[in-house]
Amino acid sequence: MSTTTSEALSETTLLRFATAGSVDDGKSTLVGRLLHDSKSVLTDQLEAVERASTARGQEGPDLALLTDGLRAEREQGITIDVAYRYFATAKRRFILADTPGHVQYTRNMVTGASTAELTVILIDARNGVVEQTRRHAALAALLRVPHVVLAVNKMDLVEYKESVFAAIAEEFTAYATELGVPEVTAIPISALAGDNVVEPSANMDWYGGPTVLEHLETVPVTHDLSHCHARLPVQYVIRPQTAEHPDYRGYAGQIAAGSFRVGEAVTVLPSGHASKIAGIDLLGQSVDVAWTTQSVTVLLEDDIDISRGDLIVPSKDAPPTTQDIEATVCHVADAPLTVGHRVLLKHGTRTVKAIVKDIPSRLTLDDLSLHPHPGQLVANDIGRVKIRTAEPLPVDSYADSRRTGSFILIDPSDGTTLTAGMVGESFASPEPVKDAAEDDGWDF
């Protein structure tokens, strides 16, 4: 098997998923159970958990400690940050993000679920669907996570009653469908006891569906970036200018989406210059085709002025370039984002100056209502923004590509990440761009 074929096979067997749920619903315990029962925990890790559990006066090992890695989390018994874990079974590799349940950590769930193909939303069987459940369903829909697993946890505390599970599953599925979630799989579990997590439960013979792990191993990875619009953000221009390679000029970067082939007609954005791919170098070898996530160097037939931040795309599938971006954003910084805020916008490998021209609305996750023209967004707020950039940017819709349809806003004074954005609609302004900026260089 060739290197490229092996890498492609490896990528198709990787599932990124996130967990979410209210505080004390058992997210960390579920993840710990998955790691423990799938034999993905090292002996020294398990021994450390057993010692920590004993010190806390618990009779058995608290599997939640396998993911609650921060000292503050262990002391408070809650998840604060996003805990990433990597494990594998014979069928698939996994990257999981255990995200916080508190409403004030909404931004952390956005971070964890932004690259996920599946989200596991936990519900305490005793409490049913609560406000935070609806928030997490709304975020999963907003982030266009293709698969949602509803894990109705703590079934042992409701005597494993099928009627309790059925009522919760029906209510959640109806709500998620209204939000536009494409697929919901409901599974009754007890993370603490291990029911239907890795092994089928003997206590719920009325349930004939998959366990959590079985579903994770078999769910199709539908959001395959290799089938998205081909995009190569240029990270570095390689010009060795040696005697061996006097005319070598390559454009290096990681393919963000799609695939590229030698001989393909391409366009460089935002300049709009066109050429054809003369060669593709991958790991020191020449290849005919390269695809998503591979780091490559592309050589073109024509000598074009290309620099870091430019985007190489197929000529027949080029995105529009615009200086006016409308997007849905999640504000992640403690300092608010306000109308008139001067920021840096980072899209792919390109960073440009920008101004927040308007904040048309803020989303209230409790009831999904819109608060018009709030004037600002504070930490964990989700809202719509209109941004004007100093230079044209080639942007995709987030609905078409989660990688090239996203961006971040940065504080130019200290480099702090302010906001994570998802391009919802780009539109051209009828006003011409000013020839000269004002004194501070931010009016455009």
Image: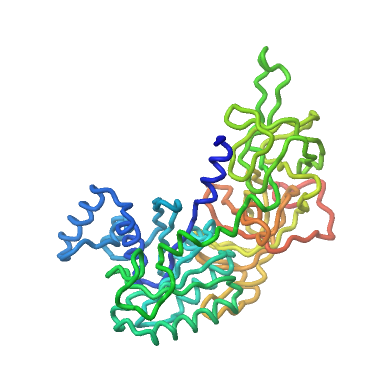
Which one is nearer the viewer's eye here, 92 or 228?
A: 92
Residue 1 lies, in percent from the top left, at 55, 36
Choose between 376 and 381: the one closer to the eye: 381
Q: Residue furthest top?
A: 243
Percent across and percent down for residue 120 are 45, 67
Scheme of image coloration? rainbow
Residue 21, percent from left and from top: 42, 70
**Residue 257 shown left or right of residue 314 in the figure:** left
- Residue at 68 percent across and 47 percent down: it is 440
**Residue 299, relative to residue 397: is it above or below?**
above
**Residue found at x 40% / y 69%:** 102
In this rendered view, identify the residue nearer to me: 20 or 60.
Answer: 60
Q: Is residue 138 visible?
A: yes
54 in relation to 434, above or below: below
Residue 302 sits in quarter: top right
Residues 192 and 373: in front is: 192
Q: In the image, is 26 to the left or to the right of 218? A: left
Q: Is residue 334 visible?
A: no
Give the answer, above or below, for where 284 lies relative to 25: above
Is residue 201 toward the left or the right of residue 410 in the image? left
Q: Name the side, left or right, on which 424 lies relative to 427.
A: left
Q: Position of residue 263 (x, y in %)?
A: 77, 35
Count of labels in the image: 0
